[in-house]
Structure formats: structure tokens, C-alpha cells
Image (cartoon, rainbow, N blue to C red):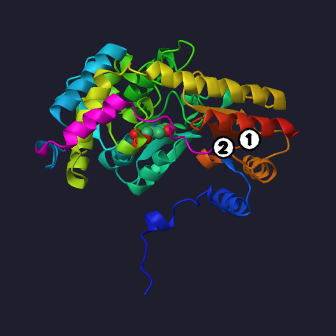
Amino acid sequence: MEIKWAKRIEQLPPYLFAEIDRKKNELIKKGVDVIDLGVGDPDIPTPDFIINALKKAAEDPTNHTYPSYVGMMAFREAASEWYKKRFNVNLDPATEIVALIGSKEGIAHAPLAFLDPGDVALVPDPGYPVYPVATTFAGGTPHSMPLLKENGFLPDLDAIPADVVKKARLMFLNYPNNPTTACADLGFFKEVVDFASKNNILVCHDAAYTEIAFDGYVPPSFLEVDGAMDVAIEFHSLSKTFSMTGWRIAFAAGNSRAVAGLGKIKTNIDSGAFQAVQVAGIEAMKNFEIGLEDRKKVYQERIDLFCKCLDDAGLDYTKPKATFYIWFDVPKGFTSSGFAATMLEESGIVVTPGNGFGDAGEGYARVSVTFDTDRIVQAAERIKELSF
Ligand SMILES: *Cc1c(COP(=O)(O)O)cnc(C)c1O
């Protein structure tokens, strides 16, 4: 017999990178030296002081049992203290913070907590694919908010149709933004707070990249805005900040009823993050400045290198103020997918086609600088030789 798949997975959009992956593997088999700038996963290792904290905590049997569903109190206290130091935002660790097994987990579970079938979630396009997929899994309907270059890649709230706004119960936002690298200021966040509060919409702000910023730019928290605690929950991850993507540790903070709602879903689905990982996370947040400047310097140097090569190739981009991506225009006459295919075939470089993040990503491509600097230099050399 053939196992029946539920419609929610049968109907998943086709994996847009499948064709690139196939071509990439074919070229590697032929002996081509492929440089993959596709995935955003830090190559810089987790700092030693965090690894040492994990080692010690892993040996303590009191950490071997089921953890608290919502996270150790000490972990939530450390998150609260970090928020105070970093954003000057006060959070009650008991009611306004919940630990997550990576922020993807919390983001994916949020629609289960806040959407009924038929409800709409407003999602950025281009954007992290988890927002629309998780919305659909929960029986909700995603509605794309196009992020356009002429608007600084911020959504135009006035452009959302009134009947959609009426059905909207959730809005996903993400600044500093993946994939566009755009940043939002408190003025824009205030507009969102007013819009959300007027229309009864919970804002889920994905703040995965607030600590990866350059040239003295300090990204704000959504929760810094007056009234944000009434309408928002913010997702913070230790993944990008501390090069801890494999560790699966993050937290959500904000409105206490939203935090409790997410906690209810989690209590019924998972059993929390390994306590030893939480103990290491506490150490990370308490000493968040150790090594951070050095890690950022590495990304910044690579971004500068790559942008220079885009200049030489005559390709248009906005220099990133934050994140470890570069979002650039594909050359005239190319689609995103066509450009990605050409790059791979002619220079053995994998870039992510912008339309993989949504229709409004068409015309763009993204590279990640989470790869060895030498490889990025090699990629830059190869791109220089192309003419568009
Ligand atoms: C990397 C990333 C995350 C973080 O994922 P984790 O599950 O915390 O590792 C969340 N949102 C976006 C947009 C990201 O790029």
C-alpha cells in the first residue's frame, strides 16, 4: 500500500532549490569545485566559554531529567537581564518569556496558538518560508505583504486590503531582515503597533539578527516601542548571535497572554530544551559581548569583499547594515532562477534565487557570507570574470 500523506504536506509548495541542488551535485561529480554561498549557517564555531559551560552542565545528573516546558527560571531570568541591558526593556521572566528549541520551533508553533481555520496571517514576501507554511499547517491563510525596494523593504500597511485586515489575527515581521538585509527603525515599529492594536492583530517579530550589525548600527527591539507589549511577541535566537545554530536554543518574549498561549502549545507537543543547553545559553547571554565584535568583524570583512566584486560586475545592491547576507539585483534579462542556474553552470557558485523566498523576491539573489573568507575571495574572482 502507499501511505497516504495529509493534504498539508501534499500541498506544500515545491522545493525551489531542488533543481539547484541536483545541478550542484552533478557538477561536483564531474569534479567542478563548487562554492556554495547558499545557506546562512555560521562557519565560526561557538565560543569556548559556552562549550565549556555545556560540558560541565552535561555531567550534572540534575540536568538529565525532563526540563521545564517553558524553560528553566534561571534561563528566563538571564534572557530578561539581557533584554534590560541590551534594549532597556523590562520583562517578567515568570510570565513574559518562554524558552524555545530554536526560534524556528516557536515561529512554527505560533499559528497553532493564535489562528483558527480561516484566520489570516500577514507574512512578509520575500521572507522566511516558515511563516506561510506554519500558517497553512494551522489551517490559517497566509497573505503576502510585498517588501519592495522603493519602500526600503518594509511592508506597506495601507496596501493591505480591508477585508484581509479584518480577518488577520497575526502578522509576522523580521528586522534586520532575511533575505533583504533591510533594517527597520522605531518609527516604523510604532506604525505597526498602532495598526496591530487598531485591528486586533498579534505581531510576531522575528529578531534573529539584532546582534549581527555593522558600522556602529544598533538594531532596536520591537518591544522598545510604547504599546508593543500589548500587541507583540518577539522571537530571539542564540543561533546567529553566538554561532549556536546546532544547539537549538532560543526564546520568545513579550505579551504575557501570547507567551502563555505559545507555552500551552509547547506543553502539549514538546518537553523543552535540554537543561545543559539552557545552562550554556545562560552563560552566553550573561557574557554576550565576549567575542561578538570579532565575529562581526569577520562577517563585515567578507561583506565588504563581496560587495566590491558586485561593484566590479556592475550589479546593484544595498550594502547590508546587518545580517550576514547580501541581497542583490540579478542582471537585466535574467530571472532569479535563470541567474542562479547560470552562476552555477558558468562559475560553479551557488547563490539562492530570490523567488525562493516568495514572489516579490523575483529579480533578486541572496548570498550568505558564512563561509571561509578564502572561498568568498575565490567566488568574487570568478564573478569578476563573468560579464552580464
Ligand atoms: C536563522 C533564522 C532564524 C533562527 O532559527 P533558529 O531556529 O533559532 O536556529 C529565525 N528566523 C530567520 C529569519 C532566520 O534566518
Q: Residues within 10 Å of mark 1 (few under 14, many from 20)?
A: many
**Is residue 56 part of the magenta span, yes or no?**
yes
Q: Earlier in the sequence, mark 1 or mark 2?
A: 2
The Cα atoms of the two marked residues, 1 and 2, are separated by 7 Å
- Side (left or right) of 265 relative to 156: left
- Side (left or right) of 324 relative to 379: left
Q: Say which element carries label 1.
A: loop
Residue, x 30% and y 46% (percent of image)? 113
Please indicate, yes or no, whether residue 185 appears anywhere in the rendered image. Answer: yes
Three-letter amino acid code at disc 2? Answer: Gly
Q: Say which element carries label 2.
A: helix
Q: Which residue is mark 1?
A: 363
Q: Residue 379: x percent and y percent?
A: 73, 39
Q: Nearer the viewer, residue 270 or 166?
A: 270
Q: Residue 368: x percent and y percent?
A: 60, 37
- Side (left or right) of 118 relative to 30: left
In the rendered image, the vertical position of residue 371 relative to residue 291, given as above or below: below
Q: How many marks?
A: 2
Q: Which mark is residue 354?
A: 2
In the rendered image, the vertical position of residue 20 relative to residue 143, given as above or below: below
Q: Which residues are magenta?
A: 37-61
